[in-house]
Amino acid sequence: MPTPGALYRRALRDAVPMIGRSHRPDVAPEVELAVAGVTVDRAHLAEYDRVCGFRLSDTLPGTYPHVLGFPLALRLMTTPEFPVPLAGVVHVGNRITVHRPVLAGETLDFVTHAEHLRPHERGRQIDVVLVGSVGGEEVWRGVSTYLGKGRAAGGGRRDPGERPTPPAATAHWRVTPRVGTDYARVSGDHNPIHTSRLAARLFGFPRPIAHGMWSKARCLAALESRLPESYTVEVAFKLPVPLPTTVAFSATGAWDFTLHDARTARPHLVGTVR
C-alpha cells in the first residue's frame, strides 16, 4: 500500500503552484490501481473499534475495509490526471455495500477507479470507487463522492429553504479534539484540517473538524446490533463536526439516521441503511 502521509505532503506542497496552472482534466482518469494480499492486523482492528465505538469482534465493521483500502484511493486522487485537486477537496457523500461478513483472518484484494465527473453548483464532483474482494469474489464496495470547490456551474447557490426539525435524539456524544488525532492514526487519513487549528483556519474552518468517515462509523456502531449480514449504508455529509462539540444521534424507524448539533440542531450527516 502507498504511504498516506507522503501523499498528503505532496498534495499540500503542490497546492500553491496549482493556483497558476491551467485547469485540470475534464474527464475521470482512465486508470485502475490495485493491491493484492491485504491482511488485517488484529491489534489495529481493535484500536479502530475502540475509536469508532464498535464492539471487539473477528468480523470487520462495514467501514473498516474503507480504512484498509484508503491509501490506494488516495494514491489515485494524487495523480496529475485526477480532475479534482486533493488540497481543499470536500468529502460530501459515501455509500458502502457489504455483500457478506468479512472476517479478520481473510486476505483482501483492492481495486480503485474514479468515475462520474459532473458539475456541481459549487464546483465539480467525482466518485472514487473502491472494491474489496476475497478469492476473486467481491465482498465489499465503497463509493466516496468528493467535491472540488470552484466556480459554480449553472447559476448561484440554491435557496436552502426552511431547515426541518430533527427527530428526537437517541443518544448524545461528546466529540473531543482527540477524535481527530485518534482517527487520523487508525485510518491513515492525516489531512491536517482534522488535527491542526492552523491548517483548519487556512481552509476556512475556525477549528479542526472530525473526519466524515469517523462520523459515519460512529453512527454505524450505534446500529451494530440491528445490521443484517448484507446491506448498503449511504450517508450525505452536511455541515462539518467542529472539535470539540456535542452531537445528537437520531435513529428513526428501522434504518434512517441523522447526526446533528445538540445545541443548534444544525445537520452534520443524514444516512440510510438498506
Image (spheres, rainbow, N blue to C red):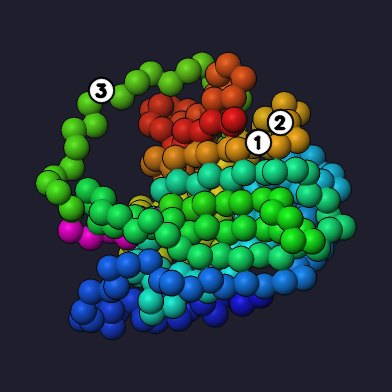
Residue 179 seen in the current view: no
Range of the magenta residues? 146-151
Quadrant that contains the N terminus: bottom right
**Residue 162's mark?**
3
Give how far apart the Cα atoms at labels 2 and 1 are: 8 Å
Q: Is residue 114 left or right of residue 151?
A: right
Q: Residues within 10 Å of mark 3 (few under 14, many from 20)?
A: few
Q: Is residue 147 magenta?
A: yes
Which kind of residue does numbered mark 3 sit on? Glu
**Residue 231's mark?**
1
Residue at image point 71% right, 31% down: 227
Say which label, 1 or 3, has the lower sequence index: 3
Mark 2 or 3: in front is 2
Quadrant that contains the C terminus: top right
Which kind of residue does numbered mark 1 sit on? Tyr
Which kind of residue does numbered mark 2 sit on? Leu
Mark 2 or 1: in front is 1
Magenta span: predominant SS is strand
Q: Percent from the top left, x then y, of residue 187?
A: 63, 60
